Each structure stands twice: as C-alpha cells, then as structure tokens.
Image: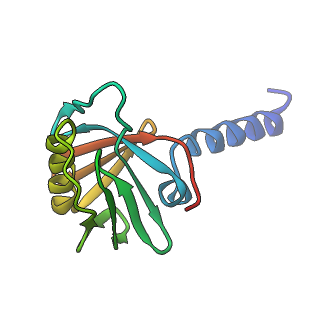
C-alpha cells in the first residue's frame, strides 16, 4: 500500500467518531428527560396533558409527574443512580394521578441506569422501571 499513514489516520478518525455517538454525563445532567414508559408500559395521558419529565442539575433533581412538581436530591456514581427523599407537591389530578403514582413509585426504586441509542433507562437491578428520551433543555 502506498499511503499507510493516510489509512491509519482514517481508521483513527472513524474509530474516534464511533466512540462519541452516545450521551455523555453532561447530557444526563443538562437534559430534561421525558418519560416514555413506566413499568414496561407507555404512559397513559390525556391528549392535552404535559408529558412527565425529570431533570438532574448540580443542585438536585426536579421534574413533573403529570400533575405535581417533583424535587429532591439524587445520588449518582458511575452507573448507580438513586433518588432518596424525592418530594412532590400535593395536588390531585384524576386524569393523570395513576401515571404520576407509577412514576414516583418507580423513581423510589431506581438503583442504576443505562444509555442505549439515546434512551435513558432507569432500572432496579436488571428490571426496567422507566425509559426516558431527551426533551427540551431548560435552565431553571
């Protein structure tokens, strides 16, 4: 081969590009994650309802469960993620309450997470509790 240096450079660049196609820790901490499933089921929301979301910040976690705001702390270390002491406001919304209850219950059991193809999966052991996708990013 006449240009082994060129071939080596192209291989290096393509390998580097392949390694960068997943979310980074900065994405996890700066993204408003929208719930897609809870306990293996798609969310059951009225058409006009705001989609529940979760956002991790340097100051803690904030979110929306379908009716109430969520707030509190989180523990993040490597692939471990927990939401101890998660609190919510206390309104009752008949059309979304079951979904919100499922979300808050799932979050109380989360102990790890994974990223696959841009999807954040919250788990307890190997059990999938919720899947989330990036929504709009907000600084609140």
- The vertical placement of 26 against 136, above or below, is below
Can the viewer see residue 62?
Answer: yes
Residue occupying image coordinates x 59% and y 59%: 139
Q: Position of residue 129 (x, y in %)?
A: 19, 47
Q: Please give the name of the residue rendered at 54% of the width and 43% of the height, measured from the top-left corner.
A: 136
| In this picture, residue 78 sits left or right of residue 1 | left
Residue 106 image point, x, y percent: 17, 53
**Which residue is at 21% across, 49% downward?**
103
Residue 131 shown left or right of residue 92 in the figure: right
* Front residue (pair 93, 23): 93
For this orientation, the residue located farthest to the right is: 2
Find residue 18 and report its image quarter.
Answer: top right
* Residue 69 coordinates in the image, percent (x, y): 34, 58
**In the rendered view of the protein, which quadrant contains the C terminus?**
bottom right
**34 or 27: nearer the viewer:** 34
Image quarter hosting the N terminus:
top right
Nearest the viewer among 96 and 60 is: 96
Taking depth in this image into account, of 127 and 86 the one nearest to the observer is 86
Q: Where on the picture, by quarter, is residue 15? A: top right
Relative to 40, does residue 22 appear above or below in the rendering?
A: below
Q: Position of residue 121 (x, y in %)?
A: 31, 46
Q: Please name the residue shown 75% across and 35% down the image.
A: 10
């Amino acid at each position: 081969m006449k240009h082994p240096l060129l071939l080596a450079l192209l291989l290096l660049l393509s390998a580097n590009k392949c390694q960068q196609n997943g979310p980074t820790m900065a994405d996890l901490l700066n993204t408003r994650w929208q719930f897609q499933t809870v306990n293996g089921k798609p969310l059951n929301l009225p058409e006009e309802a705001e989609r529940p979301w979760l956002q991790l910040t340097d100051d803690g976690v904030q979110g929306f469960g379908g009716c109430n705001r969520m707030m509190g702390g989180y523990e993040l270390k490597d692939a471990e993620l927990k939401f101890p002491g998660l609190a919510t406001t206390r309104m009752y919304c008949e059309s979304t309450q079951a979904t919100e209850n499922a979300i808050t219950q799932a979050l109380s059991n989360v102990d790890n997470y994974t990223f696959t193809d841009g999807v954040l999966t919250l788990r307890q052991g190997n059990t999938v509790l919720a899947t989330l996708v990036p929504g709009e990013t907000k600084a609140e």
